[in-house]
């Protein structure tokens, strides 16, 4: 299946999502220079569509119904609670997946807990996007912010236009129709 039907709930700073289910995802507007750099890459890739999808610069996967998120950041793959994003603008993407598919995605992603971030893949993705996606980022199998989520959702039966290492938060926004 190329895209799961989904429902989205925008949560501006100060709000917090409820009804999180295993296998859902969050698209997050990350602050700071890194968030701006990722949005700049999205602008380079999407140009005319940037205002619709390029708002987001980070993503996390819901790995249980208690609101625990799995995310990949500079220190590696870790769990956090939804409360971490209370003061951040994010969108809860509620995917229409079977319970088995949700468990499969969460189990796959959770297998990467503690692994190091794919810094080299991030650098190569930056170069690729800068030069107009002239080359594909090699798949090292290491986790990146979006690549791990894409691989987990592929295990749940979804398919994507781009390979996991070539994906950015804006690609997920486009895939699931999350526009601002």
Image (tube, rainbow, N blue to C red):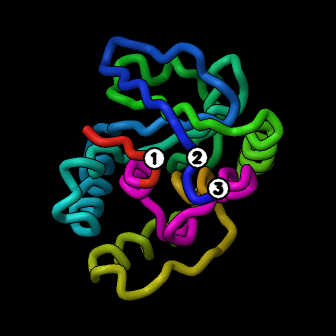
Tell me the residue that label 2 is attached to.
4
- Earlier along the polypeptide chain: callout 2 or callout 1? 2
Distance Cα–Cα, label 2 vs label 1: 8 Å
Disc 2 to disc 1: CB gap under 8 Å: yes
Please state the extent of the stretch shown in magenta in the rendering: 151-174
Mark 2 and mark 3 lie on one chain; the one further toward the N terminus is: 2
Q: Earlier in the sequence, mark 3 or mark 1?
A: 3
Up-down: is 66 above or below 123? above
- Give neighbour class at mark 2: few <14, some 14-19, many 20+ (Cα, 10 Å): some
Name the mark on residue 158: 3
Residue drawn at (43%, 86%) of the image: 135
**Circles 3 and 1: CB atoms closer than 8 Å:** no
- Residue 171 coordinates in the image, percent (x, y): 41, 57
Q: Residue furthest bottom?
A: 134
In the rendered image, the vertical position of residue 151 relative to residue 98, given as above or below: below
Residue picked out by circle 1: 176
């Amino acid at each position: 299946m190329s895209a799961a039907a989904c429902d989205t709930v925008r949560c501006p700073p100060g709000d917090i999502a409820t009804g999180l289910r295993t296998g859902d995802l969050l698209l997050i507007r990350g602050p700071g220079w890194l968030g701006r750099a990722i949005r700049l890459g999205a602008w380079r890739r999407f140009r005319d569509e940037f205002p619709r999808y390029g708002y987001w610069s980070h993503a996390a996967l819901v790995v249980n119904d208690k609101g625990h998120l799995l995310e990949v950041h500079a220190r590696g793959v870790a769990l956090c609670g939804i409360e971490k994003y209370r003061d951040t603008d994010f969108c809860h993407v509620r995917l229409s997946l079977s319970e088995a598919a949700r468990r499969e995605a969460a189990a796959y992603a959770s297998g990467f807990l503690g692994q190091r971030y794919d810094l080299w893949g991030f650098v190569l993705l930056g170069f690729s996007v800068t030069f107009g996606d002239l080359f594909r980022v090699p798949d090292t199998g290491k986790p990146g912010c979006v690549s791990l989520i894409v691989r987990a959702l592929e295990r749940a039966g979804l398919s994507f236009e781009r390979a996991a290492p070539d994906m950015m938060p804006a690609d997920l926004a486009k895939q699931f129709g999350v526009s601002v």
